[in-house]
């Protein structure tokens, strides 16, 4: 479902040697404190490039090469492991997974009996040694054969109890990481201490695990993924751990009071066929964005000890397991610029402009930066290399500068002196800066929003013209537009006869828009374009909407109990504006909608998309090419369907245009029907 990252091509021995050095340095930094100069994806590409070069030029292989070594050969630690802590081989998609499984089955000379499928936790491998039921020692993976003693962390790791349920001697293996809330807390503690933050949960966990003399303590989380008997132990348990299926071992681990992923939405399961494995891979991938901890893939293992024993190991990894890597959610890219905008509530928010980077299947060019204090705290500069995070439908965000990649050319980020929207003063009394005009500043922004193509669609009314109308006192809200006279417009600077007539015609035209667009233009808090359509269709007229109480509003599909009362309050506040629109003769009804009655609405079964949930992704072509995404969604709803922005098991249809990314991949793994924009246009042609 994901594509293999392209490899870094190496032309000659010099480039090869440089690549090896870069990989070695990067792995050392990564395993030491998570401060690598390469993100995971770039590291993977580099190592594949090295591998490819070594296959072509076996005589040039350097002893320091990271290929075939655990942790890329980054050696740390002096506590020998009883059984080596190995890596996993990677696959990057359904096809590669199937190839890998077929290869394994060829080696076995028979099908694998049962598979186990579990998340690949994005933290650090750890060995937890219990003696007579007490946690005695914690050791990092190190180079796989020896690790570092980090027993000082005992007592700070949630999910790793000091005592097991039984007084047994056993070694547990699993991943130490920070959950989202632990990460946030750790960042807050560190900020209070020295004004800095951690780059991401993984490096925060790495640093915290090693930190011995920090004046503050940060909590970590453990998830177990294996258990080993002590060498030579012939107790009943030891024999069991050598013979039980992996799934049974994990049940035993959980029964000892140790955390496993069993209680999470991505719990390990067993599967009989590679198709079922693939199905679970899709489910775990789909759940990823909502998880309170990071995963970077799915681990597929032979469940039975007999299958594992027959498959055996390579020097680096077991042959009976593989990591199905999910697209990276974090990468390093360049911060090119910072734009400042004032939102509808008057909050002034910075936005990062980035060198485009592919994250979780889509190209990211903009990312949120929170506020000025945050920029200062992180010490961000223009031109910095920054880590950027995005998963699923979350808004991409800049996490931290990669300070050791600075060149000296970086520049301070210009901070606005006045409101970037209206030029008035900034209220800096709180961390989130606001325009002193608060919501009134938004007045201009809300008119701009109200006349956009996807709302009232008043052609030729640009943002600077709206500002000019405000400055000259012609308008105070978008309803005033409908009362403008020809003389008033002609009196404006840079306004000729033709543009005046065109604008007046466009404004006249805007009076006929459906209620859904008029409602959206109001900018009611908590209702975007899609909710506005649902409200308009549900109530059919503005009068009905205004007569509705919170309970009635809540009956609109997707309207929650928190949002509904807000809508009622907002509408009351907007009454003068709505009245003015009515006086202007603006349409206040939704074509084709019937007002709510006590009778349940007959499902419009005759419509082509009746009771279907449809997601649109990628660039539209054919008859849909000229439509905005909002217009395509309107079309879906006119044809009786529900438009949604994310693919899930409930999705009936994915319309995938060119450059469709992660949504297409997710739909494929979930077995959702996928059609091209042209096929879809055919299906709904009567409604275009
Ligand atoms: S099994 C010998 N299961 O991934 C088998 N590993 O890239 C190796 N990891 O070193 C371990 N989640 O730190 C296994 N469910 C899981 C895992 C997992 C994360 C890590 C582990 C390992 C690395 C290999």
Image (cartoon, rainbow, N blue to C red):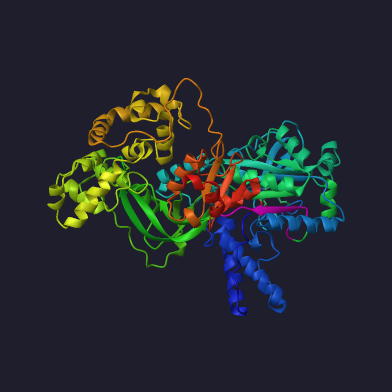
Please report the bounds of the magenta region as a residue range.
Answer: 316-328
Q: Is residue 685 left or right of residue 384?
A: right
The number of discs equals 0
Q: Is residue 179 left or right of residue 625?
A: right
Q: Is residue 10 above or below residue 121?
A: below
The residue lying at 52 percent from left, 62 percent from top is 37
What is the chief secondary structure element of the magenta stretch? loop
Q: Position of residue 465 (x, y in %)?
A: 22, 52
The residue lying at 53 percent from left, 33 percent from top is 604
Quadrant of residue 14 in the image?
bottom right
The residue lying at 33 percent from left, 55 percent from top is 339
Work out which quarter of the rendered image holds the N terminus and state it: bottom right
Quadrant of residue 549 in the image?
top left
> Is residue 327 covered in magenta?
yes
Of residues 253 and 498, the one drawn nearer to the viewer in this rendering: 498
Q: Is residue 407 above or below residue 242?
A: below
Of residues 364 and 537, the one drawn nearer to the viewer in this rendering: 537
> Is residue 617 covered in magenta?
no
């Amino acid at each position: 479902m994901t594509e293999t990252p392209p490899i870094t091509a190496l032309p000659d021995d010099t480039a090869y040697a440089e690549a090896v050095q870069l990989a070695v340095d990067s792995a050392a930094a990564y395993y030491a404190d998570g401060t690598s100069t390469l993100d995971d994806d770039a590291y993977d590409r580099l190592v594949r490039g090295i591998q490819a070069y070594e296959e072509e030029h076996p005589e040039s292989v350097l002893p320091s090469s990271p290929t075939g070594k655990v942790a890329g050969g980054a050696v740390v630690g002096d506590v020998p492991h009883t059984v080596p802590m190995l890596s996993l081989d990677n696959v990057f998609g359904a096809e590669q997974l199937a190839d890998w499984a077929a290869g394994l089955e060829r080696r076995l000379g028979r099908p694998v009996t049962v598979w186990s499928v579990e998340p690949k936790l994005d933290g650090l491998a750890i060995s937890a040694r219990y003696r007579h039921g007490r946690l005695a020692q914690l050791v990092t993976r190190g180079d796989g054969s020896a690790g570092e003693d980090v027993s000082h962390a005992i007592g700070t790791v949630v999910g790793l109890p000091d005592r097991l349920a039984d007084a047994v001697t056993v070694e547990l293996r699993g991943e130490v990481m920070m959950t989202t809330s632990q990460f946030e807390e750790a960042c807050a503690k560190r900020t209070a201490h020295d004004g800095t933050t951690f780059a991401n949960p993984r490096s925060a966990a790495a640093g915290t695990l090693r930190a011995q003399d920090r004046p503050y303590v940060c909590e970590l989380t453990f998830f177990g993924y294996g258990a080993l008997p002590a060498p030579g132990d012939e107790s009943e348990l030891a024999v069991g751990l050598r013979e039980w299926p992996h799934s049974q071992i994990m049940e035993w681990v959980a029964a000892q009071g140790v955390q496993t992923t069993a209680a999470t939405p991505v719990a390990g399961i067993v599967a009989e066929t590679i198709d079922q494995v693939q199905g679970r891979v899709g489910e775990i991938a789909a759940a990823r964005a909502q998880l309170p901890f990071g995963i970077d893939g799915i681990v597929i293992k032979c469940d039975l000890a007999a299958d594992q024993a027959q498959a055996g190991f390579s020097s680096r990894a077991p042959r009976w397991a593989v990591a199905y890597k999910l697209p990276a959610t974090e990468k390093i890219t360049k911060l090119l610029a910072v734009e400042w905008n004032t939102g509808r509530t008057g909050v002034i928010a910075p936005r990062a402009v980035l060198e485009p980077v592919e994250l979780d299947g889509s190209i990211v060019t903009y990312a949120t930066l929170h506020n000025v204090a945050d920029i200062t705290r992180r010490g961000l500069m223009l031109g910095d290399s920054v880590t950027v995070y995005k998963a699923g439908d979350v808004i991409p965000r800049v996490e931290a500068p990669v300070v050791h990649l600075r060149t000296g050319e970086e520049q301070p980020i210009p901070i606005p002196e006045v409101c970037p929207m209206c030029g008035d003063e900034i209220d800096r009394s709180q961390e989130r800066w606001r325009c002193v005009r608060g919501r009134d500043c938004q007045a201009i922004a809300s008119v701009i929003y109200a006349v956009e193509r996807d709302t009232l669609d008043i052609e030729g009314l640009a943002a600077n013209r709206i500002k000019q109308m405000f400055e000259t006192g012609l308008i105070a809200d978008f309803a005033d537009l409908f009362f403008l006279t020809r003389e008033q417009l002609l009196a404006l600077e840079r306004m000729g006869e033709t543009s005046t007539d065109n604008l007046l015609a466009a404004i006249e035209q805007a009076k006929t828009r459906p209620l859904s667009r008029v409602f959206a233009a109001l900018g009611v808090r908590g209702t975007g374009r899609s909710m506005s359509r649902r409200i308009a269709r549900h109530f059919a007229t503005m009068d009905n909407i205004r007569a509705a109480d919170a309970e009635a509003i809540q009956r609109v599909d997707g309207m929650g109990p928190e949002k509904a009362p807000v809508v009622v309050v907002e509408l009351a506040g907007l009454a003068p504006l709505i009245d003015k629109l009515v006086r202007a003769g603006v349409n206040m009804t939704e074509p084709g909608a019937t007002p709510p009655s006590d009778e349940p609405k007959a499902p419009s079964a005759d419509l082509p998309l009746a009771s279907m949930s449809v997601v649109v992704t990628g660039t539209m072509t054919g008859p849909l090419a000229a439509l905005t995404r909002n217009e395509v969604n309107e079309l879906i709803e006119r044809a009786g369907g529900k438009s949604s922005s994310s693919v899930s098991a409930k999705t009936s249809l994915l319309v995938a245009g060119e450059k469709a990314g992660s949504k297409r991949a997710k739909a494929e793994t979930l077995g959702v029907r996928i059609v091209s924009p042209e096929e879809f246009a055919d299906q709904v042609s009567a409604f275009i």
